[in-house]
């Protein structure tokens, strides 16, 4: 009685996922683990996949944050260029 879903794929094949797809699969994994109706071996496997998805999402978010720029204004309030957005 093995379910063939994205959640049971190998851990290493998430690098091509969009942020939205990775989050959706991660939410599915969390829901399955919270229900508690998954065998121990499968729980470990999908937990490891969830870790890989989490790391991939963090990498995509960091890349997006690095691309965001803040518009710099002059004293009159007119746009005067851009600068990196402070993430902290």
Image (cartoon, rainbow, N blue to C red):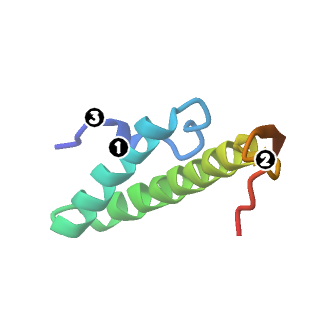
Q: Residue at x 28, y 50 (%)?
A: 28
Q: Residue at x 50, y 39 (%)?
A: 19
The one nearer the camera, 58 or 83, is: 83
Image label count: 3
Q: Give the quarter of the image for residue 80.
A: top right
Mark 3, secondary structure of its residue: loop
> According to the image, label 1 marks what residue?
24
Q: Is residue 57 positioned above or below 38 on the image?
A: above
In front: label 1 or label 3: 1
Mark 2, secondary structure of its residue: strand
Determine whether label 3 and label 2 are within 8 Å by CB.
Answer: no
Q: Position of residue 27 (x, y in %)?
A: 32, 53
Q: Which mark is residue 9?
A: none
Q: Residues within 10 Å of mark 1 (few under 14, many from 20)?
A: few
Q: Position of residue 43 (x, y in %)?
A: 34, 63
Question: Which tag, 2 or 1, sits closer to the chain's start?
Answer: 1
The quadrant of the image that shows the C terminus is bottom right
Question: Is 1 left, or right, of 56 in this rendering?
Answer: left
Q: Residue at x 38, y 51 (%)?
A: 26
The extreme top residue here reads: 16
Q: Residues within 10 Å of mark 3 (few under 14, many from 20)?
A: few
The extreme front residue here reads: 76
Q: Position of residue 69 (x, y in %)?
A: 74, 43
> According to the image, label 2 marks what residue?
72
Structural distance between the alpha carbons of marks 2 and 1: 36 Å
> According to the image, label 3 marks what residue?
4
Question: Which tag, 3 or 2, sits closer to the chain's start?
Answer: 3
Structural distance between the alpha carbons of marks 1 and 3: 16 Å
């Amino acid at each position: 009685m093995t379910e063939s879903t994205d959640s049971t794929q190998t851990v290493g094949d998430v690098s091509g996922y969009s942020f939205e797809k990775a989050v959706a699969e991660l939410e599915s994994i969390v829901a399955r683990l919270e229900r508690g109706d998954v065998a121990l071996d499968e729980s470990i496997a999908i937990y490891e996949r969830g870790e890989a998805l989490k790391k991939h999402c963090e990498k995509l978010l960091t890349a997006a944050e690095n691309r965001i720029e803040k518009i710099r204004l002059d004293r009159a309030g007119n746009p005067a260029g851009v600068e990196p957005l402070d993430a902290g």
